Image (cartoon, rainbow, N blue to C red):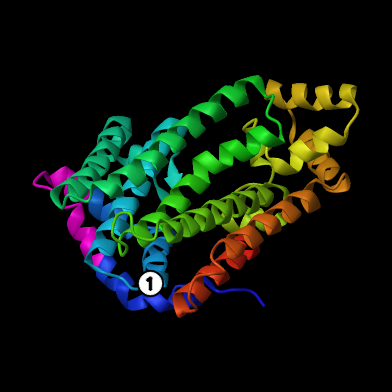
Amino acid sequence: MLHSLSDILSPVKDEANEFNRRFKRSMISTVPLVNLIAKYLIRTKGKQIRPMLVLLSAKACGGVVDATYRAATLVELLHTATLVHDDVIDEADTRRGFASIRSLWRNKAGVLMGDYLLAKGLLLTVETSEYHFLEITSTAVRRMSEGELYQLQKSRQLNIDEASYFKLIADKTASLIATCCEIGAASVLEKGENAAQREKLRAYGEAAGIAFQIRDDLFDYEDGAKIIGKPVGNDLKDKKLTLPLIHTLSTLETKEEQRIRKLIKSGKASEGERKLIMNLVAATGGLSYARTKAEEYSEAARKAIESLPESTAKKALIDFSYYVIEREK
């Protein structure tokens, strides 16, 4: 049975409405251009999985309180800021099928808007003296930044191996999802109270985030990639080595491995050559290996929270761990 995201998030449906009201209010400025861009960001928002994980994690630890909404707003401001900055870095013209901020208002406005969102998140926690929220999110920001720089270094050298890959996706993707789950728990637990429970939610988010990213990387080698609007073989075109190909390269003779790495690094691989590489990945078990790894991390996520009290929120988190490896977009 496939797990529906709308069903998974149903335990916090009412809380989601309150969050959206507060999130919109958090971006208000006296500067008209800021408000114009903020309204556009709200209109083109995605599934808001991260703030929903904050709400679910809090509910699994006792219930959603006022601080939980501030925590959810903080992580969504942080996440939105990173997306706006990423589009500037990647020179992306679209985001979720809509024109990106940098394509509509240019790079300078994109960088400054991202900075504004980060500042609003910081002020939100400082004004309420919730400094433990800052500690949790600052760790994520550091890891995400290091992950991006690590990827930049590795992509230039094209020497990424499996250990490097897992470090990269843990920092780039899983760190923020882990933060969402930990900060949700922290919002309902006093500082120092039940630290073990916070750690369980953090470990859950880390494992679920890694599984999420492996599934995302598999899209590049599957026809399903067309569903999410990402051209098949795009990672190869961008000189990105992900788990399916990394595993395949580890099975090849040194000469053949070096030939493929050199072809990818040159950036001159034709569509036909990329297709041959993708077929090779399938034939050598790269896809099945990556799927197995994703399933292992999905299971690790469930195991991390198995001792939590039974609740609709806990069940939703368990279902989400299945969703991250089942999803088609």
**Which quadrant: the N terminus?**
bottom right
Camera-nearest residue between 314 and 93:
314
* Quadrant housing residue 13: bottom left
Residue type highlighted by circle 1: Lys
Mark 1 lies on residue: 59
Where residue 35 appears, x then y in whole percent?
Answer: 18, 50
Q: In this orientation, does residue 56 appear? A: yes
Camera-nearest residue between 279 and 182:
182
Where residue 220 appears, x then y in whole percent?
Answer: 67, 47
Query: Magenta stretch mostly in which secondary structure?
Result: helix
Q: Hey, which residue is sitting farthest front in the picture?
A: 193
Q: Hey, which residue is sitting farthest right in the picture?
A: 253
Count of numbered circles in the view: 1
79 horizontally vs 24: left or right: right
The magenta segment is: 20-36
Look at 30% across and 60% down and name the residue there. Answer: 187
**Is residue 51 shown above or below 314?**
above
Look at 88% across and 23% down and name the residue there. Answer: 254
Look at 49% across and 59% down and name the residue there. Answer: 200
* Quadrant housing residue 291: bottom right
How packed mark 1 is, by other alpha carbons closer than 10 Å (few <14, some 14-19, many 20 or more), is many
Tag 1's secondary structure?
helix
Where residue 262 appears, x then y in whole percent?
Answer: 76, 21
